[in-house]
Amino acid sequence: MKVGLFIPCYIDQLYPQVGIATLQLLERLQCEVLYPLNQTCCGQPMANSGFASLSKGCDENFVTNFAGCDYIVAPSGSCVLHVKEHLVSRKAQRAASHIREHIYELVEFLTDVLRVDTIEASFPHTVGLHNSCHGQRGLHLSSMTEQGTPVFSKPVRLLNMVKGLQLRSPDRSDECCGFGGTFCVFEEAVSVKMGKDRIREHEYNQVSYITGGDVSCLMHLEGILRRKGSGIKVIHIAEILNSGHDNR
């Protein structure tokens, strides 16, 4: 199994430790991981801003870099969903189709493809989980309360395998944090208020960390936490699942 590791641009530039943790975790699970050096942005920011036509170069470059992989995995639900729904290629339509059908968010890949049932990780802290909208509603990583369907959560299932971790869920476990890509720029006040509401519930639960599968949401929450001088930290779920192992 050749797994192409896709690291979104904001992780590469601002949270490289998340990419490292993802690589180490996949290799520990016996995956042959390939990291195409010429990969760039998937084009999501342009598409979200109404300039999808400007992302065609990103599409072609993505196909060029990941066409030979059995699977493509990324620690970002929003970027994965964008590729699943929007990736096209005039030069390599079959390769683009294969990528759309075989790209996975990290939690989704561990649960649905590798079918992981044990995790050798230790994280003795109290943790709150933030469910990102793209992961929950687009990739179906967890159930949605408004639908009244049987409750499930792939991130919770994995986190419960981590030794010493105490998971505390907010009352409104599937509410948006307010990031929303460019939404947080054009609707700054609304975005911040939504983020503060999310943080208030985690503070009530007295968590030490907030985790999730999208660094973009965690980055938004981290900014609010820092401005208010909170001691709560954010950490990507890949870092928790890889905890207890030395970095390279």
Image (spheres, grey):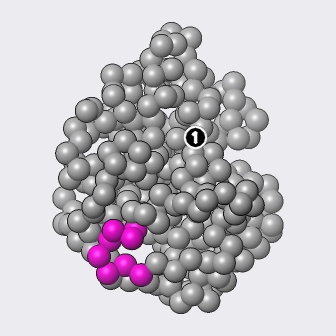
The residue sitting at the top extreme is 91
Q: Name the quadrant of the C terminus.
A: bottom left
Residue drawn 37% across the image and 78% down it? 165
Residue drawn 28% across the image and 49% down it? 26
Q: Position of residue 161 (x, y in %)?
A: 33, 68
Determine whether 206 is above or below 174 in the image.
below
The residue sitting at the front extreme is 150
Q: In the image, 52: left or right of 25?
A: right
Q: Is residue 115 magenta?
A: no
Q: In the image, 28: left or right of 200?
A: left
Q: In the image, 213: left or right of 133?
A: left
Q: Nearer the viewer, residue 154 or 77?
A: 154
Determine whether 62 is above or below 17 in the image.
above
Residue drawn 23% across the image and 71% down it? 244
Q: Position of residue 119 (x, y in %)?
A: 27, 63
Q: Position of residue 225 (x, y in %)?
A: 59, 79
Q: Name the quadrant of the N terminus.
A: top left
Q: Position of residue 232 (x, y in %)?
A: 51, 83
Residue extent of the magenta highlight: 159-166
For badge 1, the amino acid type reads Leu
User: Dot 1: few (<14), some (14–19), or many (≥20) neighbours within 10 Å?
Assistant: many
Examine the residues drawn in magenta and state their main secondary structure.
loop
Residue at the disc numbered 1: 81
Q: Nearer the viewer, residue 85 or 224?
A: 85
Q: Place residue 2 in its image quadrant.
A: top left
Residue 27 visible, this angle: yes
Determine whether 122 is above or below 16 in the image.
below
Q: Nearer the viewer, residue 93 or 14?
A: 93
Q: Place residue 236 in its image quadrant.
A: bottom left
Numbered disc 1: secondary structure: helix
Residue drawn 62% across the image and 32% down it? 85
Residue 217 visible, this angle: no
